[in-house]
Image (cartoon, rainbow, N blue to C red):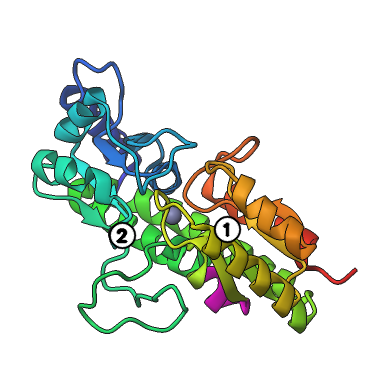
Amino acid sequence: MGVLAAVALVAVAALAACESDSGTGGTASVRAVASLEIFADMVRNVGGERVSVKALLPSGADPHTYELPPNRVADIAKADVVFINGLGLEASIQDVIDSNADGGAIVLSEGLPVLRGDQTLAEDGETGGNPHMWLDARLGAKYVERIRDALIAQDPAGQAVYEANATAYLEQLGSVDREMEAAVQSIPPERRKLVTFHDAYPYLAARYGLEVVGVLVPSPGQEPSVQDVARLAETIRDEGVPAVYTEPEFNSDVLEAAADEAGARVLDLLSDAYADGVHSYVELMRYDLQQLQEGLGGS
Ligand SMILES: [Zn+2]
């Protein structure tokens, strides 16, 4: 293609983009929404300026129990493409998404190997599998590939852009994956044990070689009983767990009490939501990496 033809094509594409987005003032070709900020960040990395994306949940919200305000419902109805995790992560907003997403939502976890909370593989079609796949950076990369393919299907004119952006971003995720692997390898094997607030880490544990030995609650919204807390304190002591992990979006008092009783340190890990100073999926993974090294590392 000659330079002039290319310039002409770009001009036409820009014009088309303006027309399709008239009224919003933006220049994006595709309007996307994603359930979590984490997935919106992935969409932003792949879509660049061709895609405007909004997260349905605020960055510090707990997806397991969140209820959407009405203005977010309108965002779903207006979107060209809607991305959700699936596996029940968005259970509390699933009905609203189903009834407002034109053509249904793209489910990022679809077709990927599902783990139960105990890190064993779920059977095909089994319900109740653990939703937190993105905390294994290789599975996070699968989400990104699905996002790329969905954006290309929605906006074929952007294919080259989406492919180039995705390739660069996937390289970053590959680095994060190797850094996380090396970080866990540097932890003495007998200390590679996880105790966390909710059951968010079976994929991270399975991929990088940690063992989930205890969680305070399987899923947020459940109240641990006095016996649950006592049992968890016993596990922390018996397993010699050096540190337990709270999550900033949840009240950590009970977990801290259990850790205190067992003489373990308390740090925090991120899973579904961002925290201070963490505003992207890559930053979230690096934050967790640093917390794991800090809490479980031998030195
Ligand atoms: Zn969760």
Query: Of marks 2 and 1, which one's residue comes earlier in the chain?
Result: 2
In the rendered image of this protein, does residue 193 appear above or below residue 249? below
Residue 172: assigned label: 1
Q: Residue 6 or 90: which is nearer the viewer?
A: 90
Is residue 33 in the magenta section? no
Number of numbered discs overlaid on the protein picture: 2
Residue 55 percent coordinates (x, y):
36, 36
Is residue 205 in the magenta section? yes
Amino acid residing under circle 2: Leu
Name the residue beneath numbered marker 2. 108
Residue 175 percent coordinates (x, y):
63, 64
Amino acid residing under circle 1: Gln
Measure the alpha-carbon separation of dots 2 and 1: 19 Å
- Relative to 60, 47 lies left or right: left
Q: Which residues are magenta?
A: 204-210
Q: Is residue 289 visible?
A: no
**Within 10 angstroms of label 1, few (less than 14), some, or many (20 or more) residues?**
few
In the rendered image of this protein, does residue 220 appear above or below residue 203? above
By secondary structure, the bulk of the magenta-drawn segment is best described as helix
